[in-house]
Image (cartoon, rainbow, N blue to C red):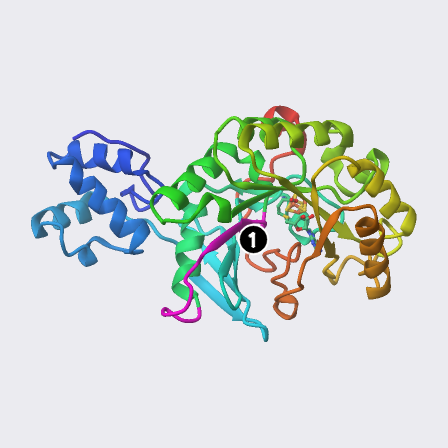
Amino acid sequence: MARTGPQTQTGKIRLLGRNRAALEQFAAGRGQPPYRGRQLARWIYARGACDFASMTDLPALWRAQLDEEAEVGRATVARTQRSRDGTAKLLLELQDGQRVETVLLPYEDRTSVCISTQVGCPVGCTFCATATMGLIRNLDAGEIVEQVLAGREHAPSRSGPSVTHVVVMGMGEPLLNYEPLVAAVRLLHDEMGLSYRHLTVSTAGYIPGILQLAEEGLPITLALSLHAPDDALRAELIPMARRYPVQELMDAMQEYTRKTSRRVSLEYLLLADVNDTEPHARALARLLRGTITHVNLIPWNPVASFSQFQAPSSARVRRFRQVLERAGIAVTQRAERGQDIDAACGQLVIKEGVRREAPPIPINTLAGSHV
Ligand code: SAH
Ligand code: SF4
């Protein structure tokens, strides 16, 4: 019998993460008509089935055979924390025991899930809790997608809006785990019915990844974490920025817009006295003059052990915003959600039980040492 993919730690073939064509091939390799593969896809992604027993329109005999050699391969939700504001943080335990966090954000009119793409992150931003983990490993496409499946299962009301938006702003730098990210984005669209326009990928500014994504023809939103108007300050905050100057990032963003017809939004994290002063705001306004960029201001969410940073005062945030608005730049401000359960942006870190069988991969050996 043809094997179409790697076996899991249970010795079974894992189906989660495969697209429809791969599942059709899997079915065909077992003497089944291709539509059986499409049924598998529907059960796994649209209906969120965790085992073959629940796939009631598959022949009982085939279900038993499937059970012998394969599995859906979902992670378990090891812990759920709910915030006062309705935000929920899910701790997913993956098949190898690694853990990753996913955040569910219910709003009046939509529900977002904030997903992770890596266990930890190799980029090492000085203000981000995830950075303290280093990179432990990349997630595969199935592990990225199943966070949305888990989010959907934990959405407050089945009758209310299910998951409508996905933001790739959890743990990890998505563009340093490129192929699984793109495979997951396609699965979210093709199999789970999410609109590309409701998918946002946030990057710390890995230019080769931005340019590659521009070529995919996926009309998803790209959010660039800029955080500083000049190279020197940016490199202090985001070590990777040493290799990717601000001006080249602006060019890469334009290229993304040209290829996808999607605007790139800029994220600007505000750290008290570091990058939140009026001169910083004016420098940012100058940098963006003539572009149609939209800026999302993110007041820093405190991370307890980072004594070198402080959240900006609301007066500073207001002033920063005014300077940009007066320069004709569209500005929004990120609503702070889930802070009481450390579920806000940049607060995700696995506090206990990080499994480090192998030492973390040194940053300069990753992705052709572009980091
Ligand atoms: N690695 C990607 C996506 C994950 S981080 C990136 O950096 O863009 C998502 C966003 O959270 C980024 O804009 C990041 O700079 C921001 N962030 C990190 N730490 C934060 C913190 N403590 N408070 C607020 N935002 C933070
Ligand atoms: Fe990684 Fe993004 Fe955190 Fe930087 S801000 S360490 S890129 S997750």
Residue 220 counted in the magenta span: no
- The residue located at (18%, 57%) in the rendering is 53
Depth order, front residue of 343/77: 343
Is 170 a magenta residue? yes
Q: Residue at x 61, y 56 (%)?
A: 348
Q: Main secondary structure of the magenta part?
A: loop
Which residue does the image show at 33% across and 42% down from the upper left? 8
Please name the amino acid that badge 1 sits on.
Answer: Val
Q: Residue at x 70, y 55 (%)?
A: 332
Q: Secondary structure at mark 1?
A: loop
- Magenta region, residue range: 156-171
Find residue 1 and report its horizontal and vertical position in percent: 16, 30
Which quadrant holds residue 48?
bottom left
- In the picture provided, is 259 more to the left or to the right than 286? left
Give above or below for 368 relative to 282. Answer: above
The residue at which mark 1 appears reads as 354
In the foreground, 132 or 355: 132
Other-residue count near label 1 (Cα within 10 Å), few / some / many at <14 / 14–19 / ≥20: some
Residue 142 placement (x, y as % from top left)? 39, 44
Toward the right, the furthest residue is 279
Looking at the image, residue 128 sits to the left or right of residue 326; the answer is: left
The part of the image, by quadrant, that contains residue 368 is: top right
Name the image quarter holding residue 227: top right
Q: Quadrant of the C terminus?
A: top right
